[in-house]
Image: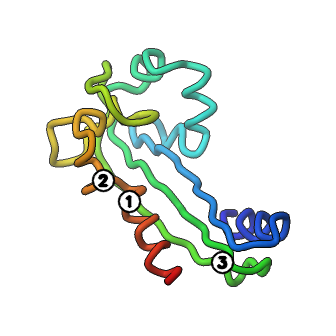
């Protein structure tokens, strides 16, 4: 899916580009919400999302697709993921989306509480760094 979307973006723009797809798979909820996270987040808000999913384990995952031509077979894919659990109430001031609710496995603070040091373990950093290195 990401390959085709990135190749289509290249075709429309006529230039190299990348796209990102992010999801949150909660194992105690059969993998929901997955890539439907953003829609559900807008619908429920942070408090509603925390009330529904707080206390559950899961994995957040990002896919970065880099298109340097309109041929989807040439699109390069870079992935990052992090496992942990969601809190029933937000903690921290920083981050985006579920960062104030998500505690990575092996840590005691949410991504939102980690602020700048989040990038050390953040899934986006791994994927975008790999894409950047591959673009040299």
**Position of 58 relative to 113 (above/below):** below
8 displayed left or right of 44: right
Alpha-carbon span between mark 1 and mark 3:
19 Å
Depicted 64 relative to depicted 93: above or below: below
Label 1 sits on residue: 125
The spot of residue 105 in percent (x, y) is 22, 47
Q: Position of residue 64 (x, y in %)?
A: 55, 64
How far apart are the alpha carbons under marks 2 and 1? 6 Å
Q: Quadrant of residue 133?
A: bottom left
Q: How many marks?
A: 3
Looking at marks 1 and 3 on the same chain, the residue that comes earlier in the sequence is marked by 3
Mark 1 lies on a secondary structure that is helix
Q: Which residue is mark 2?
A: 119
In the image, taking residue 34 as reference, residue 28 lies left or right, namely left
Q: Residue at x 55, y 37 (%)?
A: 37
- Measured from the top left, where is residue 4 in percent x and y? 75, 68
Please report contact status of discs 2 and 1: CB closer than 8 Å, yes or no: yes
């Amino acid at each position: 899916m990401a390959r085709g979307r990135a190749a289509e973006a290249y075709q429309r723009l006529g230039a190299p580009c990348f796209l990102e797809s992010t999801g949150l798979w909660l194992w105690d909820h059969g993998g929901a919400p997955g890539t439907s996270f953003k829609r559900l987040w807008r619908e429920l808000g942070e408090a509603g999302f925390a009330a529904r999913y707080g206390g559950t384990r899961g994995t957040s995952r990002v896919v970065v697709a880099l298109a340097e031509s309109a041929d989807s077979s040439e699109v390069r894919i870079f992935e990052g993921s992090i496992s942990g659990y969601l809190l029933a109430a937000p903690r921290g001031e920083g981050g985006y989306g579920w960062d104030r609710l998500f505690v990575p496995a092996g840590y005691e603070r949410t991504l939102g509480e980690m602020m700048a040091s989040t990038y050390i373990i953040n899934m986006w950093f791994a994927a975008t760094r790999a894409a950047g290195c591959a673009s040299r």
